[in-house]
Amino acid sequence: MSNNFIDFVFKFFTDLRDNSISLVYDGEINHNVIRAFTELTNNELELKDESNPIKKKVFNVMVESLQNISKHAERIDYDKQKYGRGIILISENNNYYNVTTGNIIKKENKKNISENIDVVNSKNKEELRELFKTRLSTGRLSEKGGAGLGFIDIAKKSGNSLEYHFEKIDDEYYFFILNSQISKISNHGKN
Amino acid sequence: MEKINIKETDTTPVVILDKENGVFRFEGKTLPENVAFFYQPIIDWFNEYIKDPNPETILVLKLEYINTASSKALFSLFIKLEEIIAKGLDVKIKWYYADDDEDMKDVGEEYEDVIKLPFEHIEFEAED
């Protein structure tokens, strides 16, 4: 091993520790990956004696965020893959568990995604429930099965606004980062 | 009618559909890899069932987790059951939720708001 590589590995390890990052992954997001990560995270939370409602919320947000990637991520250079590729990071601080995902999207989808999230972020808990009901009963299942409910569900369950950012890759593609925070103290939704 | 008896997995619920014994039950988690693949046979079964339904149909849902794609599939199923009501027969949804699961309680209420079927919301004690 080169010294550079050893430095990298050790720095990676201390960075993960310092930021309380319990899971980090970059690769194909498929059904089995989702199952494995939700199980792993659930076990970690159980070791911390986290409450059932919080465990469920983290599970919920992880599933929706990851399914989002598995269905919608663009696969530049990975055309042979059936599933989307992306990163996931699970971390915590004193007040929150963070579920952070990142995936590549086409420039033309950027506006649609940000508008969708902005609408969700502008709603209080009661309004989110109304929006969920409307989309549930009128939106047809899209070809990929999402029906635009994912972001609403994440906001409802996490009780917090969704943070997002687009990092430009080139003229055609952006890297979409989504961060969902789950409060450690159950406040039963966003007020 | 043929019975449906699907065993539980970590991403799909137990499903029992038994016209003869009047048992219609979903229990567990629903986040299948392919929602259409899992729910289509169930929707097909109900399409047959509504042609000649029992005088009373009580659908029991005791779900721990529903992903958004599954929530759409369940909505389609409830819409089917509305057709039985239109025939003048009884349908009821029994919606179970753990006493520590406010989110699942909310989901039941949200369905009740958008579906024209009577709901009974039943709280049970969470295991642990």
Image (spheres, coloured by chain):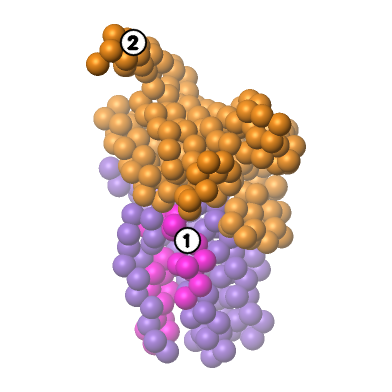
Q: Amino acid at mark 2?
A: Asn
Question: Is residue A153 shown in magenta?
Answer: no
Report which quarter residue B81 is drawn in. Answer: bottom right
Visible in this render: residue A122?
yes
Residue designated by label 2? A4
Q: Residue at x 48, y 27 (%)?
A: A98
Q: Is residue B104 visible from the viewing direction of this image?
A: no
The answer to whether A7 appears left or right of A81 in the picture is: left
**A133 to the left or right of A72:** right
In the image, the segment drawn in magenta is B15-41
The quadrant the C terminus of chain A occupies is top right
- Give the labeled residue for mark 1: B34
Q: Residue at x 44, y 58 (%)?
A: B32
Between B75 and A20, the one lying in front of the other is A20
**Secondary structure at numbered mark 2:** helix
Q: Quadrant of residue A144?
A: bottom right
Residue A18 falls left or right of residue A46? right
Chain letter corresponding to the colour purple:
B
* Residue B67, position as x, y percentages in the image: 50, 52
Looking at the picture, how far across and down is residue B84, in whole percent? 60, 81
- Residue A28: where, in percent of width, then height? 44, 43
Quarter of the picture containing the N terminus of chain A is top left
| Disc 2 crowd, CA 10 A, few/some/many (<14, 14-19, 20+) | few
Q: Residue at x 47, y 33 (%)?
A: A87
Name the one closer to the observer, A187 or B30: B30
* Chain on which label 1 sits: B
